Image (cartoon, helix red, strand yellow):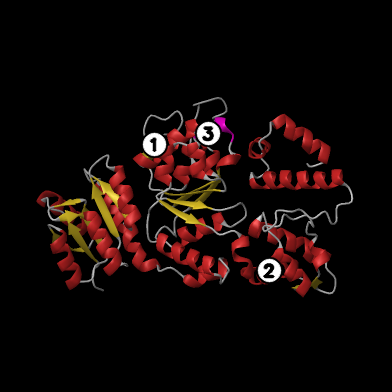
Amino acid sequence: MSRQRALIVDDEPDIRELLEITLGRMKLDTRSARDVKEAREWLAREPFDLCLTDMRLPDGTGLELVQHIQQRHPHVPVAMITAYGSLDTAINALKAGAFDYLTKPVDLTRLRELVNSALRLGTTGSDERSVDDRLLGDTPPMCTLRSQISKLARSQAPVYISGESGSGKELVARLIHEQGPRLEKPFVPVNCGAIPSELMESEFFGHKKGSFTGAIEDKQGLFQAANGGTLFLDEVADLPLPMQVKLLRAIQEKAVRAVGGQQEQIVDVRVLCATHKDLAAEVAAGRFRQDLYYRLNVIELCVPSLRERREDIPLLAARMLTRLAQGSGLNSATLSDDALAKLKSYRFPGNVRELENMLERAYTLCENEQIQASDLRLAETQTSSESGEISLAGIDNLEDYLESIERKLIEQALEETRWNRTAAAERLGMTFRSLRYRLKKLGID
């Protein structure tokens, strides 16, 4: 089997020699170039599995080389070597399509990890059928989303996944992880809004035995658990400001220190994050640090709402009903024409998650294995996107109707925070005491 080949681009002979020796010990063949022109000549002559390039070169920049490779040799991962502390440069390289970056002086352990990760891109090979099968939809927004996932899976850049609640942001994060070189390592999801603020540092970074009351043994944090893999920070906008400072440092330094610990531990973690809130607006309001936003939002990936892809509803519904039938051991149900029309005209504030819950309820209520429009139990009071008017059809008692709306919103907040009542109260903009009163009033356990 022929050995894999790397292109090293740097105008400093000492750096080139260090990289050549290190990669040679990893059983890679290397070619070296002193500038952009020579690098382009090598790329035109031979195929490469990896490129390492310095940022500053005599006849141009490494950024120009990244862009050239993206256009002419898109399957070659490129890692940028930057001066220590040049985070802006590194972020610009990632945005241009670089796989990852290293800072000078080059840490050889980190170099070897990066090279191994980049070379795995050529062996894992993304299974597009897996993405198509799990991220259903033939509409243009979904085709674009799948294409973006495949591209982002080949990078180590942080990705900010935006979208409404229930639109499938965690699934998108999982697919980015599973299509990339970290597939065999852990994918660790965490709902930032569900962790009590006093436990956040311990949850993220771990703690040492005896570091605080109740710390009866050493505990591994989420960063350590995700080492080598991906950490998905869902609802990242819910992080309190003091924790945002600590998170920023962990991401920049690629190291964490456990509560009560003396030594920092190097961690190799790709960070993906998501929130249903407008993160830029949170920054403007002073609730989210601008420097952390800049660090997390290297690339933004927008997940479309179900309203933006109504034509996908028949396909999604059919798949969900088949899955429900398989889970129950009963025959599958179909949607009547009226029921399908009703679904396609509904606004779905809860998106795909709401559709799934709605069909599960209708599946248990329907007769003769066909779901009628009445089985869907859709609220008749929807705001028209064109007129802004509200229909009063179906409202027999205003108090009962308002109570049903309140119940639905509270239950949704509890589900999204995994029944953490403190986090749910914050999500709803009320005090914990007020939420407790409403739970008792509505009989919600």
Q: Choose the circle earlier in sequence order: 1 or 3.
A: 3
Mark 2 Cα-neighbour bin, 10 Å: few <14, some 14–19, many ≥20? some
Percent coordinates x, y for residue 94 in the rendering:
33, 53
Q: Which residues are magenta?
A: 196-201
Q: Choose the circle earlier in sequence order: 2 or 1.
A: 1
Q: Which mark is residue 249?
A: 1
Mark in the foreground, 1 or 3: 3
Give the amino acid at mark 1: Arg
Give the amino acid at mark 3: Pro
Is there any visible trace of residue 377 in the rendered image?
yes
Marks 1/3: CA distance? 15 Å
Camera-nearest residue between 340 and 259: 340
Query: In the picture shown, does residue 329 fall above or below 420?
Result: below
Residue identifier under label 2: 317
- Residue 403's quadrant in the figure? top right
- Identify the residue shown where x is 23% and y is 59%: 65
Percent coordinates x, y for residue 384 in the rendering:
71, 57
Image quarter where the C terminus lies is top right
Residue identifier under label 3: 240
- Residue 48's quadrant in the figure? bottom left
Is there any visible trace of residue 207 in the rendered image?
no
